[in-house]
Image (tube, rainbow, N blue to C red):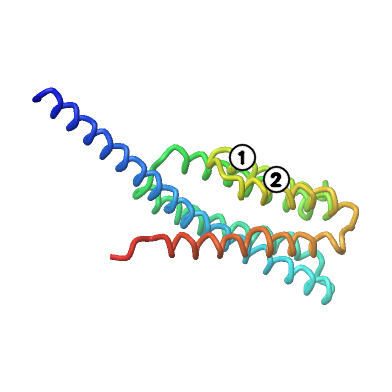
């Protein structure tokens, strides 16, 4: 009788531990969704602002200022993202989050290097720089999908890969518009949706 009771106690304890683990994973997933939705919204807004500003600078014949503008806005976004990331690291310090942060930091650094290569050094045309940028963002989504085991994030990578092909065909004038559209529908809006869902899924206290 005692052995049966002990077995039942062990089963109950194991079930409670499994439930606690599932809850931790769910909370961590929700926390990651909340965290990265912030970055999607931040850089989505930055890229759309930069795209509109680029066309305005062209309209007023200030083409040489475009690369500097992109370096400034992307650099500012990176600074904001770094400060937020350091603050979040004190609260959530998981391997998955570190891998995701490292992935998107590499993507952002690549984008800044492309801005410099296009405007300040003149090694690349605008359409080629934007095509590589689009492919880099697609790579970031693909790696994030594998790390986070998320089919939805993986699907978000497809338009960016396609953009990497279409942008050089569109040329320097229409290339930024394609990036702006991709950013609106496949970064900014998904970021807003992710944030709303993560907030709605947060338990009310």
The N terminus lies in quadrant: top left
- The answer to which quarter of the image holds residue 16 is top left
Q: Is residue 136 above or below residue 200?
A: above
Is residue 112 visible from the viewing direction of this image?
Answer: no
Q: Answer with left or right where residue 137 lies relative to residue 8.
A: right
**130, 139: nearer the viewer:** 139
Q: Which mark is residue 126?
A: none
Residue 62 horizontal/vertical position (percent) = 80, 70
Residue that appears at 41% across and 40% down = 94
Q: CA distance from mark 2 to mark 1?
A: 11 Å
Answer yes or no: do the residues labelled 2 and 1 have beta carbons within 8 Å?
no
Task: From the viewer's perspective, tell me whether residue 49 is left or right of residue 100.
Answer: right
In the rendered image, which quarter contains the C terminus? bottom left
Q: Which numbered disc covers residue 136?
A: 2
The reply to whether residue 50 is visible in this rendering is yes
Residue 170, x across and y down, in percent: 89, 58
Q: Nearer the viewer, mark 2 or mark 1?
A: 1
Residue 96 coordinates in the image, percent (x, y) = 47, 40
Q: Residue furthest front?
A: 1
């Amino acid at each position: 009788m005692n052995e049966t009771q002990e077995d039942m106690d062990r089963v109950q304890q194991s079930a409670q531990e499994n439930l606690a683990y599932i809850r931790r994973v769910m909370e961590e997933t929700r926390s990651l969704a909340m965290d990265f939705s912030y970055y999607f919204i931040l850089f989505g807004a930055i890229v759309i602002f930069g795209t509109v500003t680029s066309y305005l600078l062209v309209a007023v014949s200030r083409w040489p200022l475009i690369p500097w503008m992109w370096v400034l806005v992307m650099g500012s976004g990176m600074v904001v993202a770094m400060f937020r990331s350091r603050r979040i690291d004190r609260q959530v310090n998981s391997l998955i989050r570190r891998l995701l942060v490292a992935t998107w930091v590499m993507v952002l650094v690549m984008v800044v290097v492309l801005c410099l290569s296009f405007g300040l050094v003149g090694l690349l045309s605008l359409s080629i720089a934007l095509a590589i940028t689009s492919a880099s963002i697609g790579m970031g989504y693909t790696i994030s999908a594998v790390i986070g085991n998320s089919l939805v994030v993986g699907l978000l990578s497809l338009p960016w890969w396609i953009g990497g092909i279409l942008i050089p065909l569109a040329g320097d004038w229409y290339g930024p518009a394609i990036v702006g559209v991709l950013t609106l529908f496949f970064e900014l809006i998904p970021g807003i949706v992710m944030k709303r869902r993560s907030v709605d899924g947060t338990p009310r206290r």
